[in-house]
Amino acid sequence: MLVAAAVILLLAYDSPFSQLITTALIAACFSYAAFALRKLHVKRIMHLVLLKLCFVIHALIMVTQFSLLLSDYLGLLQTDLKQILAVILISHIVITTLTAMIWPLMMFLEHEQVLSDLANRDSLTGLLNRRAFISVSNNYLEQANNNLTKLCALMIDIDFFKRVNDQHGHETGDEALKWVAKKIKSQLREHDLVARIGGEEFAVILPNTSQAQGEILSERIRLAIHNDSFVHNDHEINLSISIGIITHKSGTNNVNELLAEADKGLYKAKLNGRNQVVTMAF
């Protein structure tokens, strides 16, 4: 549309009517571009949001310019539009320049974030993977030792998860893992750390948390899953989890030691009949 308008109207652009048509066509093009971007379905869209905002602003400016030109063409204005149109032109240039500078930077930053997520996130649940979890947890543990604050570690396992895969298929099993991950995360505080560390097993670090507080939060997580039903493909499946919990001992510098102790609690919970929280003492 822009090329057609240029070819047809370039030679006759001095006439007010041609300017009106060209302005209307450009406004329509920017409006359609913003609408087309809105229909795109992609996960990383910040740079597209910026581009859409640019198109919307351009369209609004062109609509303003069209209104002024139309009013002038109909003789409703007694003002010389040269300065106003010059300001509009400068606005287009400034907005386009800023977009050209910022948009590539935002794309780069978002691509960096994508690469970081691929390296540090579990692709199924979106939680941290084991490697990233251990790295961040060790920092939490160091802070707890330096500040002499308490910290709890949880090991969580879905009970009889193999039955879900065997009876309903692995697709349902994957959805169940995502459901459990969401349930766990919904019960945690903003500064708590959670990861899927393998299979149907999850790990949680609770900074600034006493043993009693950790037990309460662990029980809340257990009940959130036990008291609800996972539904997929019209199948209602009752799930439960077992949890082992340990409160860190001052001077412990390796989070793997904490997780190993919490895992012993998890093992006891399994032996005692599952669907329960077992606290271990260092």
Image (cartoon, rainbow, N blue to C red):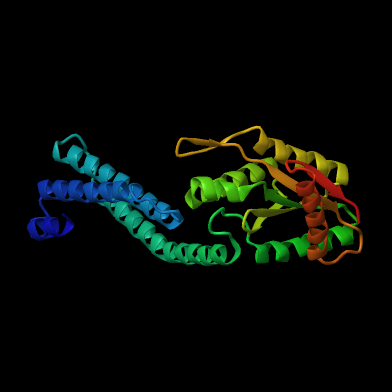
Compared across the picture, whether 68 is left or right of 53 comes to left
Q: Quadrant of residue 197?
A: bottom right
Q: Is residue 260 above or below residue 23?
A: below
Residue 6 screen position, x and y as percent: 13, 59
Report the residue that reaches farthest toward the top. 227
Q: Nearer the viewer, residue 83 or 212?
A: 212
Judge from the rendering whether residue 268 lies leftward or rightward of residue 249; answer left or right: left
Of the 4 image quadrants, the one containing the N terminus is bottom left
Q: Is residue 223 left or right of residue 126?
A: right
Kindly identify the residue that appears in the image at 15 percent across and 36 percent down: 75
Question: Residue at coordinates 31% horizontally, 44% vertically from top-left?
Answer: 60
Can the viewer see residue 189 in this picture?
A: no
Q: Nearer the viewer, residue 246 or 73?
A: 246
Count how many numbered circles sit on residues in the image: 0
Residue ID at (57%, 67%):
119
Q: Is residue 271 left or right of residue 184?
A: right
Q: Quadrant of residue 259?
A: bottom right
Image location of residue 185, percent across then percent down: 65, 45
- Give x and y (percent) for residue 21: 14, 47
User: On the rendered image, what quadrant is the C terminus found in?
Assistant: bottom right
Give the residue drawn at x 51%, y 63%.
Answer: 114
Residue toward you, 263 or 207: 263
